[in-house]
Amino acid sequence: MRTIDITEVRGLPLFAGMEQENFETLMRGGYVQTFPPQVELITEGDPSDFLHIVTEGSVELFASWNNRETMMATVRPVSTFILAATIKDAPYLMSARTIEKSRLVLLPSLDVRAAFDVDNNFARAVVGELAQCYRAVVKNSKNIKLRTSIERLANYLIRQQKYNGGGAEFELRIEKRRLASYLGMTPENLSRAIKALRSYGVTINGSHVEISDPQDLASLAKPSLLIDDPHH
Amino acid sequence: MRTIDITEVRGLPLFAGMEQENFETLMRGGYVQTFPPQVELITEGDPSDFLHIVTEGSVELFASWNNRETMMATVRPVSTFILAATIKDAPYLMSARTIEKSRLVLLPSLDVRAAFDVDNNFARAVVGELAQCYRAVVKNSKNIKLRTSIERLANYLIRQQKYNGGGAEFELRIEKRRLASYLGMTPENLSRAIKALRSYGVTINGSHVEISDPQDLASLAKPSLLIDDPHH
DNA sequence: GTGTTCGCTTGATAAATGTCAATAATTTGA
DNA sequence: TCAAATTATTGACATTTATCAAGCGAACAC
């Protein structure tokens, strides 16, 4: 394992408080791997053999049922995913695939659970991480149940604008068909929603977004800390 | 606090492994209260002052936005709710109200966090509980994003049937308007969905449900462990 | 470069779901 | 027990969202 990985991983809140010895033990059992785009890393229903950490690239989490598929989340560096399955030793609830060429650290679930058992700081960090994830999914659920697709798109754009520094222009960092799936609609419907937002001062050209009248957009979107703020 | 409460609470997986002394300290700070129906116990956005435990009755968790409201979950005895907010010392993401006359144990969040800091078994139990909650919300999200309203209803009935022992007849233990909100539809739409299920051998009369052909219903519902099994 | 593929957009149409209004059934409370 | 309030159902209709089909355009492979 290259040094840079350990540094990056060590910096994650999840691992920052671990005893050095436990951290090293945990890392010794893990390995780094680079995957091309569109590789299915894990499949829902499979036993959770590894805790995954994305250090480069991006990964999408998605779920399937009855020949339908929906995107649940995008994971960007540096973060872990499927921690809950690893800790509970339960099957994955979501599948994961690389969106682009990506580098991952894989830590055997057994080792993670062992570290969890011996290292109290790690156990506490896991709590923080799980609570965070839980709240993120609850927000997501509220977003989907309480808002129409146009409102979801409007709020997504406002969130992205903030994430990108708040300027009037920024780039969508996601394919539109994935965005549509994430927002719980079809690509066709997203196209139409984008057109509908023109009257609120939003111009989207390819992946380039321009928000000319944030107030106007916000009057439609009505963003809420309890849905849209990832840290709240 | 009456003894029965302590016994019930002590039996919860969350508290079962605690040091007796820590458990007693935690309980000393808490108190028991009985509420009439329709009392709003907590309001989303408020700071999380107490960890709540339902020991009798039932409580619904719901969320609001822009004058709309949706039911997120029903909490029945004996279980806790809003653990994540308590642990993270973050504002509630959901509101809670009693559905019927209910008895609750309220534990000050400060005390819970203190117990979490000193009792490693408790900290580990919190992990288990949070992971469970996280997975429950993920399943819920999949249910809503991947299924139509009729499919959600069909699967709900199958889950309830199993929960009630698997017999052909059982009672809905929830008002239909609440069920509609939980399933992400209007009461009118639920009424029509119920009628639509007649052709799959489902008869619902008031709160009485009869499933005459489980196979037929299952062929529509296509239940999945990864969405419908609470323990998977 | 050029052909092909894939993603995006648009229009037409269909299906799902929501809204409104009226009525029926049920529960609640005096 | 009865009146009032709430909940459930139904019909007519509107809106939202999905589906299908076609065409466009950028990215990619050879």
Image (cartoon, coloured by chain):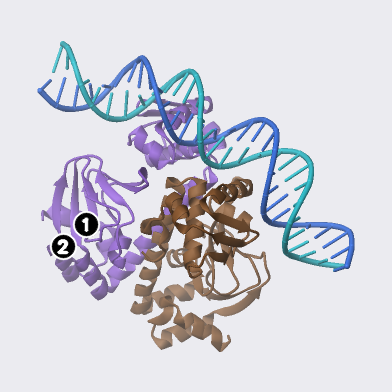
Chain colours: A purple, B brown, C cyan, D blue
Q: Quadrant of residue A156?
A: top left
Callout 2, which amino acid? Met
- Which residue is located at x 38 percent, y 37 percent? A179
- Does the CB distance between marks 2 and 1 fall below 8 Å? yes
Q: Are marks 2 and 1 on the same chain?
A: yes
Callout 1, which amino acid? Val
Q: Locate the N terminus of chain A and report the quarter of the image it occupies.
A: bottom left
Figure check: C3 above or below B11: above
Figure check: B106 above or below C21: below
Q: Along the line of sight, which residue is nearer the eye, B15 or C26?
A: C26
> Sequence order check: which comes first, mark 2 or mark 1?
1
Q: Residues within 10 Å of mark 1 (few under 14, many from 20)?
A: many
- Residue A9: give its label: 1
Pinpoint the chain carrying mark 1.
A
Q: Could you say whether the residue bearing mark 2 is in a helix, strand or loop?
A: helix
Q: Along the line of sight, which residue is nearer the eye, D4 or B89?
A: D4
In the rendered view, does B117 fall on the left or right side of A12?
right
Q: Could you say whether the residue bearing mark 1 is in a helix, strand or loop?
A: helix
Q: Name the residue carrying label 2.
A: A27
Is residue A232 at least partly visible in the picture?
Answer: no
